[in-house]
Amino acid sequence: MGRNFETRNPDAPGWLQWLAALLAEELAPRPHRLATSIRLAAIATIGAGLMAAAHVRSELGPYVVWLMLGPVAMLSPRTAASYLAITAPILAAAVPLAGILAESPWLMLPFIGIVTALSTYLIVTRKLGSIGLVWQVVTLDTFYGVVFAPRDFGWNDAALFGACAIAFSLIAAFDTWLWPDPAAAILLESLAASVERTRERFVQAAAYFIEAAGAARPAQPPATSEMPVQLALLDRAGAEGIGAYRRAILLAAITLVERLHLRVDRVTIAAREDVSHGIRQMLRPALEAACGAIAAAMAEAAHEMRIMIRTGADAPPSPAAARAGAALDALDAAIARARPRYIQQAGGREIANFGAFSESLHEIVGLIERPLDEPPAAPQPAPTTQAMPAPQSDPALIAYCLKVALCVVIGYVIGLLTQRADLSTILTTIIVTALPTYGASLRKMILRIVGAVVGGAVSLLAIIVASPNFGSLPAYMAVVFAVLFISAYSSLSSGRIAYAGKQLGTTFLLVFAGLSPSPDIYAPLWRTWGILLGTIVVTVVFFGLWPVYAGDSLLPRLRKVLRDTLALVPGGAAHSAAEIHRINTQLTEVLSEILQVADDARLEGRRSLIDHDAVVQSAGTVRRIAHRLATIALWRLEEPPPRLDDPTEAAADAVFSALGRRLESWLSFYQSDASLRSAAARALASGHSSAEIARPLEEFSNRIQAQGFARIAAWPAEQRRRMLDQLQSMRRLEFLMSELETHLAGIPGAAAPGGLRYAAAVATGRPA
């Protein structure tokens, strides 16, 4: 649709073309989207209607319903009751405290700062999510409202508690009985749709590269991906009770889809570059066959993902993936035959460009032809509910909590100076947009402003049109449903506009909360202005005074992943099966956080200290290494194989020792002061010899295979099979460790320009 717009409007401004293409892509109908939008809008509208019918006069009531919907776990009646039981004492305690502090204004500001910092710390460490934000909002609203309504704020809190009771009960009823909507199924559909859209981008870029008839120039790669939405769905699925094993599989699928997305970005960049086309014309038949086979394999992967996720890293590729591999082999053979001619005819830029395109094809096939690595299955099903993790002392987290507290105090002071009760939205905006990293905050700020402006305009229109012409509750509910449906539908898009869509509904509910005639347009304007002021406060503190970039957030997590992977090496720190399963589950959690940091780095662009592409690739590779190491370690602990002769055992131990030394060297590097220096990372990678692992592995393999596997011939059949599986895994670990070091060396420093990536691709030696 974006290409058609560009064709029909050749004189339109570039930003307008981009916006039309973006909206056409993001708002296109997708499976499950319409039903989910109706569900979310219906729940929120019914909640607002029930509050109006029950005369629960709380401006935050409909907002609480809307905040608790979306990428959060389904609410069971038991959980809803526990949430309400905690909300009651929070509001009850806030009333007398607010009254006391209103008499001692000099204590109010430090108290608000301390409460904000502590609550933010608990929300992050306990992973409270939306309910944590609800508790923060209701508490801060109480301390803000007492200044402007010292005689009524207690009644306001009582109304707010009633609104929470209606909200929690209604959502629990829908999630449990009326219209459940489990996250795991939505996630699979989202992954399949992402692969399908990635395939469409690949087909467009490949057609332009090989100069197919009627092919239009592909658009620039999108600035964001759907990975943040999918990670939120994964967290929701985990809260809904999926086990650690299934969670690891779904995280692996999310990583695979994102890696495909990034590889197709490189294909698109190569296709868009303005260079001569001699090589591609020379190899056009082989290129067409390879690209067509890859597109077919991606279509097969999208179809399969809706039904199941293929696992078993050593299983054969699917039929379409096998055909893609064969077509790529044919392309390599054609390149080898044509090389003497094009080396003499083509320039360096053209060779580098073709090398980048060819290398990206190989990487795409490498991702889709091998089923996902799976973690070792736990000995018993994971519990449906997990204990909350104990808070960890983290200087970066403490600094983040202090920044949020500072912003809230500044916002509170601004509200007091303006003497407007409507500016309580300043505090809500700060709580929502103040995120740990520069990129995450930047994205949410921009989208919140866009959503607030659009939502404010819609709210004013609704007040102007609905208030004079409608007088019944059902009529107002119809207006609310229409706006919330639009908000929900747009919020189910990718991370590029999803939060703006959610914020549209949030702004509308804060403004149009009464569901009764109200010609007052000044309060909505003040609330919209409060959102802008809150955004300005966060901008000054988080971007100007105290910026934290994705690289700063990545390093502690990367160290933890390397440390945990090192513990899984046979003979490492994990001495029991329970410990191995615990570490493997912990790795899944941290890798999920690393992928979120990678998306923040993408948005930071050249300000970022890390390359988001290399972070995603590293996360995918280290996950595969950890799963294989965990499987080997579990076998050795639970079903120890008969001992081999000393030289053979020594060779196996040498392989694992070499793997451990490599991981230790990278752990030491990322603990050092040079951790974000790209030259130091490349020097470390180049200083490692492949023979360090390959030589003892070859010796171990030869000794196992000697004389027709004589050393294990007397073993039980199951033990022989396990040993051969271990040998295959060790061979794969050699390759994966080399791949991981390449990606780890690429993390420091922002993403390289396209031309440098092309040169790096040429260095692989495939096309040149």
Image (cartoon, rainbow, N blue to C red):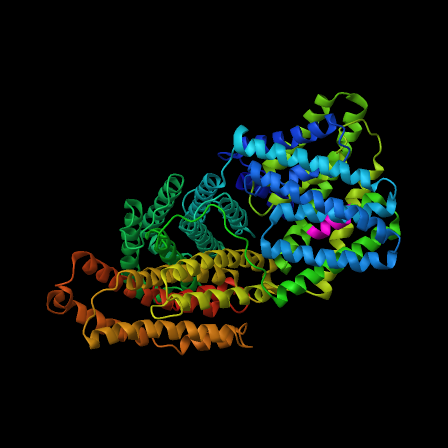
Count all numbered tags in the image, as a single digit: 0
The percent position of residue 438, horizontal first and vertical second, equals: 64, 60
Range of magenta residues: 425-431
The percent position of residue 488, horizontal first and vertical second, equals: 61, 36
Quadrant in the picture for residue 46: top right
Q: Nearer the viewer, residue 14 or 174?
A: 174
Residue 91 sits inside the magenta stretch: no
- Residue at 62 percent across and 46 percent down: it is 130
- Residue at 68 percent across and 43 percent down: it is 87
Instruction: Describe residue 556's horizontal placement relative to residue 726 as left or right.
Output: right
The answer to whether 372 is drawn above or below residue 540 in the figure is: above
Q: Nearer the viewer, residue 753 or 72?
A: 72
Q: Quadrant of the C terminus?
A: bottom left
Instruction: Describe residue 396's horizontal placement relative to residue 704 as left or right.
Output: right
Q: Nearer the viewer, residue 8 or 271?
A: 271
Please indicate, yes or no, whether residue 275 appears anywhere in the rendered image: no
The answer to whether 41 is drawn above or below residue 622 in the figure is: above
Instruction: Describe residue 671's horizontal placement relative to residue 54 as left or right.
Output: left
Residue 430 sits inside the magenta stretch: yes
The percent position of residue 315, horizontal first and vertical second, equals: 27, 52
